[in-house]
Amino acid sequence: MGTRLFWIAWPAFLAACVLELLVFAFVDPTELHWAGDTVHWSRQAVYTVTFFAFWAVGAGACALTALLRLEPAEVNALDHGEAAAGP
């Protein structure tokens, strides 16, 4: 199970890093607006929150990929709380 967690977390982390660089190469955090009002957060707060949001979205996508690559026997073993064979 620990290996699968790293299969999910590491690519999501790398994707969040790349997205953070790409987004903030073109967006100034001090000029962000939410529901018609200016966001009054520091630059570092905006960078931090968006990084974790990107990481969460990436982790969701990686988790879905990890789930979809499971064999039916592995899924059944997860349902019954048994140890599944395989990586």
Image (cartoon, rainbow, N blue to C red):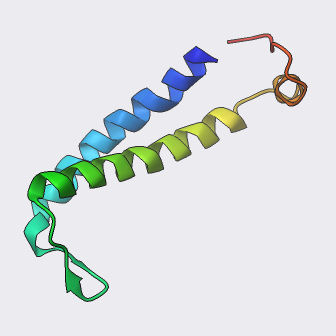
Q: Nearer the viewer, residue 52 or 87?
A: 52
**Horizontally, is 59 left or right of 81 in the view?**
left
Q: Residue at horizontal 29%, vertical 55%?
A: 50
Q: Nearer the viewer, residue 28 or 87?
A: 28
Q: Quadrant of the N terminus?
A: top right
Q: Position of residue 57 (x, y in %)?
A: 46, 50
Q: Residue at horizontal 45%, vertical 30%?
A: 9
**Horizontally, is 29 left or right of 48 in the view?**
left
Residue 81, quarter of the rendered image: top right
Q: Position of residue 58 (x, y in %)?
A: 45, 45
Q: Residue at horizontal 18%, vertical 48%?
A: 21
**Horizontally, is 80 left or right of 86 in the view?**
right
Residue 40, quarter of the rendered image: bottom left
Q: In the rendered image, is residue 28 in sight?
A: no
**Horizontally, is 24 left or right of 1 in the view?**
left
In the rendered image of this protein, does residue 14 appear above or below residue 33?
above
In the rendered image of this protein, does residue 55 appear above or below residue 31?
above
Q: Residue at horizontal 9%, vertical 69%?
A: 30
Q: In the rendered image, is residue 10 in sight?
A: yes
In the rendered image of this protein, does residue 25 appear above or below residue 34?
above
Residue 15, quarter of the rendered image: top left
Q: Position of residue 18 (x, y in %)?
A: 25, 43
In the rendered image of this protein, does residue 75 appear above or below residue 25?
above
Which residue is situated farthest in the bottom direction here? 36
Q: Position of residue 47 (x, y in %)?
A: 19, 52
